[in-house]
Amino acid sequence: MRITNCKLSKRVQKKLLEFFVLQVTARSAADILGTQPNSAILFYRKTHMVISHHLALAADEVFKGSVELDESYFGGRRKGKRGRVRQEKWLSSAS
C-alpha cells in the first residue's frame, strides 16, 4: 500500500513525513511549510493508514494459526460519581 493521488510536491511530502516522525501536529506542520492544514491532515491520515496496513501484514506473520485468549475482563464501570463532587462526600467505611 502506498500514498496515491497526492498533489503535494515531493519536497513537501518529505518534510511532512519528517514532522510526522517528530510527532508535530498536522496543523503546526502546515503552518511551518505554508500549505493548507487540510492537506497536511489528509497526508497524516494516509500515512497512518499505510503504517496500520503494514503492521497488520506483520501481525499475520507473527501470529500464525489459532490464538487463545484467557477469560480476562477489561473495562467495566468506575466506582463512585463522576464530575465535580466535593471530597467530603467520598466516605469509605471499613467494617
Image (spheres, grey):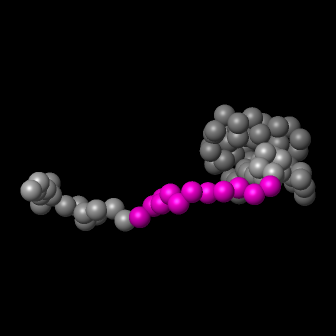
Q: Position of residue 73 (x, y in %)?
A: 48, 60
Q: Which residues are magenta?
A: 65-76
Question: Does the segment drawn in magenta span residue 72?
Answer: yes
Q: Position of residue 12 (x, y in %)?
A: 82, 41
Tell me the quadrant of the picture where the C terminus can be found.
Answer: bottom left
| Predominant secondary structure, magenta span | loop
| Residue 8 in view here | yes
Residue at figure coordinates x 62%, y 44% from the top left: 25
Identify which residue, 9 or 24, lies in the foreground: 24
Looking at the picture, how far across and down is residue 17, in whole percent? 77, 39
Tell me the quarter of the picture where residue 45 sits: bottom right
| Residue 16 quadrant | top right
Camera-side residue of 85 and 30: 85
In the image: residue 76, left or right of residue 43: left
Q: Seen in the image, is 35 located left or right of residue 91? A: right
Residue at (90% x, 58% y) in the render: 5
Residue 59, image x and y in percent?
77, 49
Left or right: where does residue 89 sit relative to residue 53? left
Relative to 34, is 89 above or below? below
- Mark count: 0
In the image, residue 48 sits, relative to residue 84, either above or below, namely above
On whether residue 70 falls in the magenta region, the answer is yes
